[in-house]
Amino acid sequence: MSEITTYEKTKDSGIEWIGSVPSHWRVHTLYQLVTQVKEKNSNLQEKNLLSLSYGKIKRKDIDSPDGLLPASFDGYNIIEDGDIVLRLTDLQNDHTSLRVGLATERGIITSAYTTLRPIDTSNSKYLYYLLHAFDLKKGFYGMGSGVRQGLNYAEVKELRVVLPGQDEQNAIVRFLDNQCGQIDSIIEDTKSSIDEYKKWKTSLIFEAMTKWKSSDYKSSGISWLGDIPKSWHLVPIKQVVLQRDGGAWGNDPEGSDLDRICMRIADFSFEQGCFKRQLTDLYTKRNYSASQIKKLTLKFGDILVEKSGGGEKTPVGRAVLFDLDFEALYANFMERIRVDTKKVLPKFFLYFWRALYFRTVTTAYIKQTTGIQNLNIPLLLEKEYIPLPSLETQKKIVTHLDSLCNKIDEVIDEQQRLIPDLEAYKRSLIYETVMGKRKVV
């Protein structure tokens, strides 16, 4: 690791977002260092489709059946290795995206983005880090006047920046490439570790739900379930469900005196199978009619399943247990399942559902329409079976799994807290280095 010190002599750059800089660094206006790229992809001369996502420029399949792709790519921009791409649209609504990317190969990208080409290509990587630092400080949102939906090159080119000499630029780029690479590697290792812990927890749940302290097994006749203890009963899920209802938003304009706390998908903690928060004032309140309140009021032990929405990484079917001590209703996109507690404990049912979900059984009941997933819960309850031991054994299994899963969740939470700390350190390192607050020797 390179030694980091501060510069002895500094000066005021005269640029608010930069502040003081090393005295030998020079101030420039961006148009002195870059030109705008406007090279149309006429006659589809280039087919290497690129996209800017989370601050990275990545390849995209030009032949993909994805309906979001345009009918023609003739109007796309041809860009080269070293070009800097800025996404300066939707500034009003999206305050979280990373908007600066560096091209590492020739390709085409939407002309809705602004592409800059350094006049001196040796400045390319440093200028990228510089604009990336500006982006991390959310600088693009403060440009122009009033509420802006987007910016254009005529506005961005007036941005004032600082530039050290070439040797110092090269040293800074080498340092940041090395340090950011190490941080990214640690973050990826941490994410992989979290995924492994999650898989381990899933396997423990499945093992307990099918192989609990038995030496005598029988075939369930269900491929994903396999053998189960001989004393257990295999029961259609519908036989343990007393009630099933879909949620709704409050929509009574005159029901202000009937407003109720409304549970949403955003309030779920799917990993723990419960809700994230306990304070009632953190939940959405909506106006419900008296009939809606009667139908949608949750009871302790109700299971809520995400039935609509989802995505490729988070398909629908995730479930949580309502175990809070206040009155609440539940919103659209969720289904409430109330079980017969004479046959199955709600928490046991939740653990079974999670075993069912993580074994991808639920995917057979998901229908995809225009990017939205819909889970056919009635059909799933009709077709699938649940293995049931005695209530006493169910209680032992739940206690065992609660203890194991809580310990694993604590480790996962600790590792998850590490990621934003690493990302914050990386942002600080980039900003302070390219702004001359730290000296790379």
Image (spheres, rainbow, N blue to C red):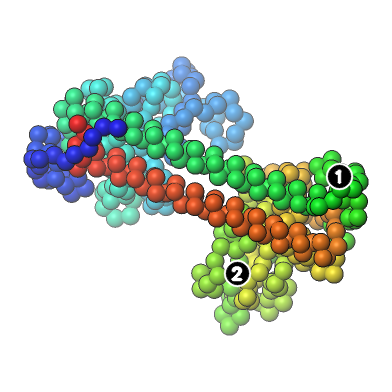
Residue 219: x %, y % from top left: 90, 44
Residue matched to label 2: 262
* Mark 1 to mark 2 CA distance (whole Å): 41 Å
Secondary structure under tag 1 reads strand
Amino acid at pointer 2: Cys
Callouts 1 and 2 close, C-beta under 8 Å: no
Residue 215: x %, y % from top left: 86, 48
Of callouts 1 and 2, the N-terminal one: 1
Q: Is residue 319 above or below residue 363?
A: below
For the residue carrying disc 1, how many other residues have a C-alpha within 10 Å: few (<14), some (14-19), or many (20+)? some
Q: Residue at x 12, y 34 (%)?
A: 26
Q: Is residue 402 above or below residue 61?
A: below
Q: Is residue 422 above or below residue 319?
A: above
- Number of callouts: 2
In the image, taking residue 407 as reference, residue 369 lies left or right, namely right
Residue matched to label 1: 227
